[in-house]
Image (cartoon, rainbow, N blue to C red):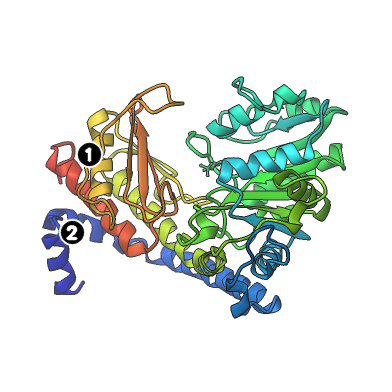
Amino acid sequence: MLDEIKEMYQEMGIRKSVLDFGQDALSGLKERFEKIDEIAEYNQLKVIHAMQKNRVNESCFKFASGYGYSDYGRDTLEKVYADVFHTESALVRPQITCGTHALSLALSANLRPGDELLSPVGKPYDTLEEVIGIRPSCGSLAEYGITYSQVELFPDGSFDYENIRKAINDRTKIVTIQRSKGYQTRPSFSVKQIGELISFVKGIKPDVICMVDNCYGEFVETIEPSDVGADMVVGSLIKNPGGGLAPIGGYIAGREDLIDACGYRLTSPGLGKEVGASLGVMQTFFQGLFLAPTVTAGALKGAIFAANIYERLGFGVIPNGSESRHDIIQAVEFGVPEGVIAFCKGIQAAAPVDSYVTPEPWAMPGYDSDVIMAAGAFVQGSSIELSADGPIKPPYAVYFQGGLTWQHAKLGILMSLEYLVREGIVTL
Ligand SMILES: *Cc1c(COP(=O)(O)O)cnc(C)c1O
């Protein structure tokens, strides 16, 4: 390592022993990082290829106003997404406000009263509980007479095929599969595993719609769930596919009839995808997608680096330091609240924005314990940017993700360790 780099780390508050510990952990990761770069290379080509095929040009960055008829950039971007995900169609809009909205839209557009939604992979992401009506909520699917059933995973995270078979009935219309573990301790699924599950489900009921919540999973592998039979893949643009540049948005890519239904639900019956001005964000959507493969690779390297550091220090890490990766989330169990707090303070202190503020645990709405969150992001709530949060309850785990560059992720993780050392929670 260049002396200038060492000096700079020290000037920014990272002591030598922390830096040395980090470099030591890093020395064993060369081959894995090469593999990640290879996946990024493939995905970079995939994205550029799709942009070339659809003749992306300067006029794509201009935009319509008002109703947004013939918003050329918007329509071209949707073709690019459809080609990246190898689907017939896509809906990619700033009017889709977040990942939860995209998922809610995909479900409500394609379910009708009397239909049933099935999750064969246990409990969905927290915010989906209110969308579905697992927790009673105004406007939920349950209020519209759509029922829900769920099959738990086996304790090792594998699929309970026997009970999935039993749960599929003549009212089952959509099967929802969440790729990432989110903030649970189950493993995230590989695209291959998702493909096996979809084949099984379609073997029982061929016309069932398989939807995959793809949040945090995009570009982690060379294939996406839509390559293995998913009828719709859904995600947020302030996660992986926005590449850190998209300031808002969500996408749904999939079968044309299903995407058309999403368009009619997002805007209005009769109008559908034809309206919805893109109001100047298209350049960030295109450029963000262009950067997304390498941004995702940087975030993955950060996650693997952290897993290796904290595993060496004896903390529980999920996934562990050597497992294969299917999303960009890393969990570290500290066992004590002070560990979670020090970690988050370090991540915050390493941020390009708001580095001088100190995160504190607080009673956030929707959570059953205090939660601490660290984020110094250019885009509010963006979790493709380096961010961390942890509920202040056993096992005192912190979940972190993102990093627009590997170098920033590295700094953040070293700073988290620096804070743990400062607080006396770790001695090197
Ligand atoms: C982030 C996330 C969501 C919800 O996305 P928001 O943009 O926060 O609404 C849904 N599912 C999974 C797995 C996620 O990671």
- Percent x, y for residue 113? 82, 27
Query: Amino acid under label 2?
Result: Asp
The quadrant in which the N terminus is found is bottom left
- Percent x, y for residue 317? 38, 41
Taking the image as four quarters, which one is ligand 1 found in? Answer: top right
Q: Is residue 82 visible?
A: yes
The answer to whether residue 44 is above or below residue 208 is below
Q: Which residue is mark 1?
A: 342
Q: Which mark is residue 379?
A: none
Query: Real-space Cα distance between discs 1 and 2?
Result: 20 Å
Mark 2 neighbour class, 10 Å CA radius: few under 14, some 14 to 19, many 20 or more: few
Q: Which residue is mark 2?
A: 20
Residue closer to the observer: 92 or 205:
92
User: Which secondary structure lies at badge 1?
Assistant: helix
The residue at the point 12 percent across, 58 percent down is 16
Q: Is mark 1 within 8 Å of ligand 1?
A: no
The residue at the point 45 percent across, 63 percent down is 295
Q: From the viewer's perspective, is 374 left or right of 224? A: left
When asked about the image quadrant of residue 141, the answer is top right
Q: Is residue 200 visible?
A: no
Query: Amino acid under label 1?
Result: Ala
